[in-house]
């Protein structure tokens, strides 16, 4: 029977094209509990997720750790591109991310910025990706830029394309014109 470590290694090698694992060093992920030490460390980490042979997402990180004792990976300086029907629809960047290797849910934090192909830019200090619902969400403060309009507030739910964006609390809108405000209001319905 395969050990947990060999299953993790197999999963990482199947998902990742990278420079290769190296022995864990003193450089551990900044928020790793002491009981959950890294068992593998990758420099130049890259992973992809597909469904029925169609690319759904692609992640790149400066460095990634597979954490011993959990089903998580931790990464720094992360870029994630989301795809729909094989085409890139948004790209997210963050200083740090935690990835659940079972569900592929992701928690990003630190200067999180998402650029949608439609021109929408989302900024927050923390953002989560729910792989099952294919939505991003947060309870943190958010700033959404679209054209010359800025939408701010607290909490958010959005789709991967950044077409359906809902700010949940303390919503404020700054816009350059009434026509643009009407267009945004119509698009949100």
Image: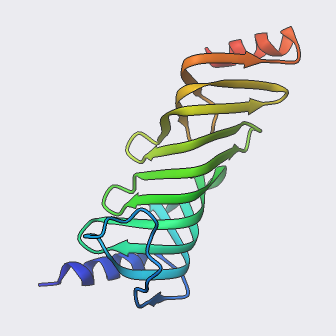
- The answer to which of 124 and 167 lies nearer the viewer is 124
Q: Position of residue 156 (x, y in %)?
A: 53, 29
Q: Is residue 109 left or right of residue 175?
A: left
- The answer to which of 30 and 137 lies nearer the viewer is 30
Q: Is residue 55 left or right of residue 69?
A: right
Q: Position of residue 136 (x, y in %)?
A: 50, 40
Q: Position of residue 37 (x, y in %)?
A: 31, 75
User: As displayed, is residue 116 above or below residue 187?
Assistant: below
- How many numbered badges does the structure rendering display? 0
Residue for point 82% across, 18% down: 175
Q: Position of residue 158 (x, y in %)?
A: 55, 33
User: As displayed, is residue 6 above or below residue 99?
Assistant: below
Q: Is residue 85 visible?
A: no
Which quadrant of the view contains residue 67? bottom left
Q: Quadrant of the N terminus?
A: bottom left
Residue pushed farthest left? 1
Q: Is residue 170 visible?
A: yes
Residue pushed farthest right? 177
Colour scheme in use: rainbow
User: As displayed, is residue 186 above or below residue 164?
Assistant: above
Q: Quadrant of the C terminus?
A: top right
Residue for point 49% across, 58% down: 97
Residue for point 55% across, 66% down: 76
Residue for point 48% across, 77% down: 16
């Amino acid at each position: 029977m395969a050990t947990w470590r060999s299953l993790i290694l197999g999963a990482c090698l199947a998902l990742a094209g990278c420079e290769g694992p190296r022995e864990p060093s003193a450089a551990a992920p900044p928020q790793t509990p002491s009981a959950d030490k890294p068992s593998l460390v990758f420099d130049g980490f890259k992973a992809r997720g597909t469904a029925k042979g169609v690319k759904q997402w692609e992640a790149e990180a400066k460095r990634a750790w597979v954490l011993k004792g959990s089903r998580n990976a931790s990464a720094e300086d992360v870029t994630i591109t989301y795809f729909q029907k094989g085409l890139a629809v948004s790209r997210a960047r963050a200083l740090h991310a935690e990835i659940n290797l079972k569900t592929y849910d992701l928690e990003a934090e630190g200067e999180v910025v998402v650029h949608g192909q439609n021109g929408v830019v989302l900024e927050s200090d923390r953002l989560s990706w729910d792989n099952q619902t294919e939505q991003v969400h947060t309870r943190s403060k958010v700033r959404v830029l679209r054209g010359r309009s800025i939408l701010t507030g607290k909490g958010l739910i959005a789709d991967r394309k950044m077409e359906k964006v809902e700010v949940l609390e303390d919503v404020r809108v700054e816009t350059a014109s009434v026509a643009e405000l009407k267009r945004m209001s119509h698009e949100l319905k």
